[in-house]
Image: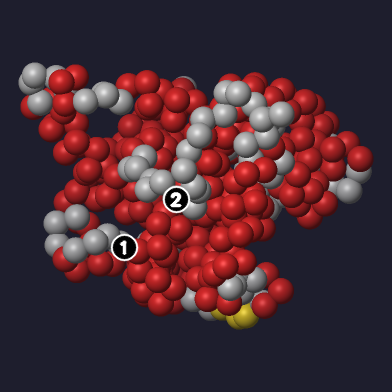
Amino acid sequence: MADARVEPVAPTARPERRPELDALRLLVVLGLVFFHSALVFDTEDDFYVKNAETSDVPTIVGGLGVVWAMPMLFLVAGFGAWHSLRRRGPAGFVVERLRRLGVPLLFALVTLLPVPQWLRRRAADPGYHESYWRYWPRFFDVHLEPAKFPFVVQGDDFETGHLWFVLLLLVFSLAVALLVLRLPRGLARRTLDRLAVAAQRRGAILLPTVPVALISALVGLEKNYAAWHRWAYLLFFLYGFVVAADERFRTAMRREAGWAAGLGLVLYLAALPGFLAADDPFTDRTALAIGARALYGAAGWCWLVGILGLLDRRGRRRAPAGPSELPADEEPDRRSRRVYGYLAAAVLPLYVLHQPIVVAVAYGVVGWHAPVAVKYVVIVAASLALTVAAYDLLVRRTRVTRFLFGMRP
């Protein structure tokens, strides 16, 4: 029997603007400043610049973020990909993705990504005095390794750095465009409709945990990509693409949000002892490590359902029913919309800019004779201020720089 609490939603209903998705993107990107600053003091991570005194605390606390943060970015990107494909068609979507993602990726590879690697050398060896401009060509001493697709360009110093996210997102977007071109439209619509109908059953929206858990358990996790495997990110991207295509998925996420969030927390806490006890929980083939990774993967999708569903519930409760409920003074609302628009457009440039700035600030701070807490606060505060200032003064004000950082004219 159908659940009486299922909200009837027309499968062809026009999707409304969802500001909570932009807010989540911004929260994750700004949160990365706090996260990467913490890696300066982490015992396990091989960050570019390390403080002399380190701790295991960043690993434990950071786990609460990595289990959902980057998967959320890929999920939201999948939402955006569906809407962009719907408006532009496959060919227009490919052009738009190459401009919005490919251009900033190439620009940052040439101008920004060598900086952290150069500072790594200087921090590791006090006797290293090579200038940046003499080091810069060495960064591009590369070779091809197709087996590491899509990270096929490799080198002793060369890396995509934190822009692995942009590269994966570009590859996933191009793959989806090709899939849309090849897949018969009628088959795609019928399959989507069946999935949307199935999602209305109690708990069915959590079934996508199974593929994510299997990849995490059997293929492993990749420390260099925020503690998830690259192909798990592909699943999150595809899930976002599918969920955006039919409002019935959104209804199901809203309905199951509360217990999905609780289940995600239980799964994460159950996985934690295995991660702490295994020698290498990311790749070990022991039953303990495999089980911990499976629980971790399942927790990720549960938390995404919980976070998005609960935010959607809150947004629907706060939405005014009609013009009579709008505030008399609309000036604060206009101001908040301007701030929201400013920050929503800044997400990709802020992401591209933040890590080289964090590394540069940390390079200057770790040598101070000060408590760890003071150093951390200084690195976070200075990095946030410099990242936002660089965006505002150097990126958003000219057509050329906007183009180079993937912004609209």
What amino acid is at disc 1?
Answer: Gly
- The residue positioned 64% from the left and 71% from the top of the image is 149
Instruction: Name the element at disc 1.
Output: loop
Q: Which residue is mark 2?
A: 12
Q: Is residue 400 left or right of residue 21?
A: left
Residue in front for this viewpoint, 26 or 56: 26
Q: Is residue 50 above or below residue 167?
A: above
Compared to residue 344, the image places residue 408 above or below, namely: below
Closer to the observer: label 1 or label 2? Answer: 2
The answer to whether residue 380 is left or right of residue 325 is right
Which quarter of the figure is the N terminus placed in?
Answer: top right
Q: Position of residue 137 (x, y in %)?
A: 44, 76
In the figure, is residue 235 to the left or right of 328? right
Per the model, the C-alpha gap separating discs 1 and 2 is 31 Å
Camera-nearest residue between 194 and 281: 194
Residue 33 percent location from the top left of the image: 42, 39
| Above or below for 238 versus 157 | above
Badge 1 vs badge 2, beta-carbon distance below 8 Å: no
Write down the residue under mark 1.
406
Which numbered dot is residue 162?
Answer: none
Estimate how packed mark 2 is, as few (under 14), some (14 to 19) or many (20 or more) residues with alpha carbons within 10 Å.
few
Q: In which quadrant is the C terminus drawn?
A: bottom left
- Residue at the spot 85% in from the left edge and 47% down from the top edge: 284
- Front-lying residue, 37 or 228: 228
Q: Residue at x 65, y 51 (%)?
A: 194
Mark 1: few/some/many CA within 10 Å (<14, 14-19, 20+): many
Instruction: Assign a secondary structure to mark 2.
Output: loop
